[in-house]
Amino acid sequence: MSRRYFIISILLMLACAASVSAEDQKAKVKGPITITSESLTADNKAHTALFEGKVAAKTSEMTMYSDTMLVFYTEGSGDVTKIEATGNVRLVKGTRVITAREAVYYADQDKVVFTGDPRAMDGENVVTGSVMTYFISDDRSQVEKSRVFLKGKKSN
């Protein structure tokens, strides 16, 4: 009997450790967000913050720029739940740049949905479409009505 309980408790500890490390990994990917702008209007009742003018939202891995950003946050912890960016949206991550007229970041799904002529560029390679979804944690994209322009390497 005691051996059975011992094995069950070890399995439970391993399951708990796996879920904690997955959450730790997700926290590392997101990290803190630093937002700068020319002006800020906070609405504590609606749990929103409107950033206007040369807005830049930076994490350790990427930066999103736009004319305005409406940030939604939770009441108690102040965690960001959603960001709506409009006007001259540009996300920069390494050598990749995604531009669009609008973008919405969903924290619970760790994704950004770009609309309004979205265009992704990596060097001279370009992808366009009607809607572009970037899954940040998975480093994966989904593009509706896509067009891909690949610049091949020159041969000697």
Image: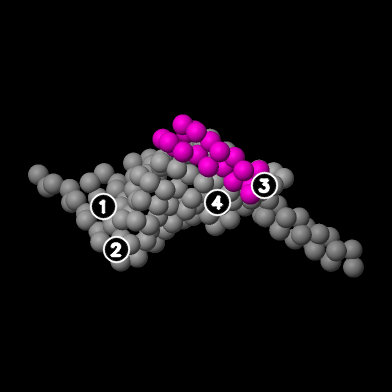
Q: Are marks 2 and 1 in contact (CB under 8 Å)?
A: no
Q: Secondary structure at mark 4?
A: strand
Residue located beneath label 1 in the image: 126
10 Å neighbourhood of mark 1: few (<14), some, or many (≥20)?
Answer: some
Residue 43 in picture, x, y percent from top left:
62, 43
Write down the quadrant of residue 127 in the picture.
bottom left
* Cα distance in 3D space between marks 4 and 3: 16 Å
Relative horizontal placement of residue 113, taking residue 41 as reference (left or right): left
Residue 13 in picture, x, y percent from top left:
76, 55
Q: Which mark is residue 45?
A: 3
10 Å neighbourhood of mark 3: few (<14), some, or many (≥20)?
Answer: few
* Image: magenta residue range: 36-56
* Cα distance in 3D space between marks 4 and 1: 27 Å
Residue located beneath label 2 in the image: 146
* Cα distance in 3D space between marks 2 and 1: 10 Å
Write down the quadrant of residue 97 in the picture.
top left
Q: Which mark is residue 82?
A: 4
Q: Are marks 3 and 2 in contact (CB under 8 Å)?
A: no
Relative horizontal placement of residue 91, taking residue 149 as reference (left or right): right
Q: Secondary structure at mark 3?
A: loop
Q: Nearer the viewer, residue 2 or 144?
A: 144
Q: Is residue 111 above or below residue 4?
A: above
Q: Are marks 4 and 1 in contact (CB under 8 Å)?
A: no
Amino acid at circle 4: Lys
Q: Is residue 100 above or below residue 32?
A: below
